[in-house]
Amino acid sequence: KMSDKERALIAKTHEEFGTCLTAERLKSDFQQLGISSGMTLLVHCSLSKIGWISGGPVTVIQVLLDLLGPDGTLIMPSHTANNSDPKYWKNPSVPSAWFDIILQSTPGYQSNITPTFNMGTLAETFRHWPGVLRSQHPQFSMIAIGKKAKFIIDKHYDSCVQHKNNTSLHLAEYRFQSNDNIEKVFITGASILNAETNAREWSEWKDYDYNADDFNNVGNAFDSIDGNTKIGKIGLAECRLMKQYLLVNFAVDWMAKNRPKQENV
């Protein structure tokens, strides 16, 4: 049965274009945005924002792979934030009586079977794509296919769209906080499979308490500089194309100037 959300998406797409979105239309939009052969492309996408697409996520992925060609690489986040300590969960939280049960019963992360969590239909479809590689981080894995996929995925060690959802800015935040700008550090963890025994176990590590509240401010400041960001429409969605290293370097400097100094806790 078709949902009300899908009916609304069909109506909005038809009102704007007079037809549904096809591979040909998406290819043209992506090319106008600047996507071309040989690129290494990290994609964050809310599929429903684009409009009603004939073929859905499979069409989008195939178009991107065709445009990138054999020398290109396509990357997406495949995070599993639900593989974490439930005492930190919000929106929704769970009863405290459940905490120990969840810690003891969550299956260990396995890159080949653990589904993504709240990453959207596109990323979950891409996870199943033939030839896609997935990194071993139990919470923040990435998936990739293409010329540089193995190099990128192998480097993501298991030691554990708006700018607010841009994971590149978390890299900037990590670098900012590593430069003696220490904010809150806490103990987090995830369920993993022991590499030697293949037994499920809970693994813990120290991490920064990341804060995405100002990510849109960082992104807007970055976008305001000529040449940093190319903005265009993919179907109904406003999309951004930028060089990741420029964004990360800019964000580290922006945080140093605009975030208050914090004491180490």
Image (tube, rainbow, N blue to C red):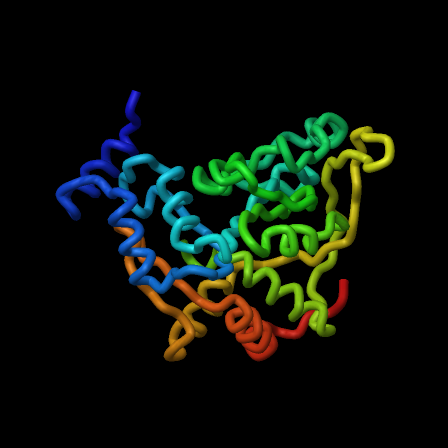
Looking at the rendered structure, the number of numbered marks drawn on it comes to 0
Which residue sits at x=43%, y=49%? 65
Which residue sits at x=82%, y=29%? 199
Residue at the outermost right position:
196
Which residue sits at x=30%, y=20%? 1
Q: Which quarter shows the C terminus?
A: bottom right
Rendered view: 110 above or below 139: above
Which residue sits at x=78%, y=49%? 205
Relative placement, left or right, of 68 versus 26 is right
Of residues 34 and 204, the one nearer the viewer is: 34
On the image, which quarter does residue 180 sit in?
Answer: bottom right
Rendered view: 128 above or below 16: above
Rendered view: 20 above or below 153: above
Q: Position of residue 203 (x, y in %)?
A: 79, 41
Q: Position of residue 198 (x, y in %)?
A: 81, 30
On the image, which quarter does residue 80 sit in?
Answer: top right
Q: Position of residue 154 (x, y in %)?
A: 69, 51
Q: Position of residue 231 (x, y in %)?
A: 33, 65
Of residues 27 and 108, the one nearer the viewer is: 27
Of residues 190 and 256, the one nearer the viewer is: 190
Residue at the outermost top position:
1
Relative placement, left or right, of 173 versus 106 is left
